[in-house]
Amino acid sequence: MSTWTDRARLFVKGKALLLDLGRPTLLYTESGPKRARYLLVGRLAPPDWFRLGLPREEVLHYPLPIDPLDFAWEGATLILPGLRVYLEGPPEFVETPYWAWPL
């Protein structure tokens, strides 16, 4: 299953959710700036990334125990339990312990 936005493509891959930003992007996260093309959410080990066709670099991984179908879009924000990805930049306030937005 996949979903398009004007900024990214979202895939459900087994027990993981994969957000492809289309190109490497500098993101501001709860742990500081990171460069990534892919945001991977789910409990996967790096060897599992290769099965998904992901490179070693450019992957921002959130090992959250989620149901990959338990997501929503609110405008340009991807909403998951415990994680928000704000594709249009920083929000007024952050609602979850994990978050990212492009710089």
Image (cartoon, rainbow, N blue to C red):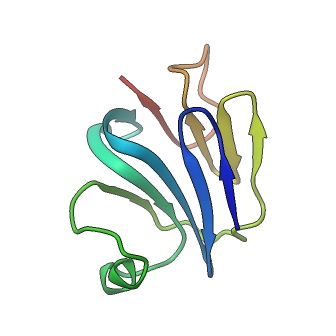
Q: Quadrant of residue 61?
A: bottom left
Provide residue 36's location: percent of width, then percent of height: 31, 47
Q: Is residue 11 left or right of residue 61?
A: right
Residue extending farthest to the top is: 92
Q: Nearer the viewer, residue 28 or 31?
A: 28
Q: Quadrant of residue 64?
A: bottom right
Q: Quadrant of the N terminus?
A: bottom right
- Direction left: furthest residue: 57
Is residue 98 shown above or below 102?
A: below
Q: Nearer the viewer, residue 11 or 101?
A: 11
Tell me if 67 is positioned left or right of 44 in this view. right
The x, y position of residue 27, in whole percent, is 35, 34
Q: Is residue 20 above or below residue 85?
A: below
Seen at 54% across and 30% down, the residue is 87
Please give the count of numbered marks on the rendered protein: 0
Left or right? Give the position of 39 relative to 17: left
Q: In the rendered image, which quarter contains the C terminus?
A: top left
Residue drawn at x 78%, y 61% as measured from the top left? 70
Q: Is residue 4 above or below residue 90?
A: below
| Residue at x 72%, y 71% (from the top left corner) | 67
Q: Is residue 93 above or below residue 43?
A: above
Write the residue at 32% across / 36% down: 25
Image x and y of residue 97, in percent: 55, 43
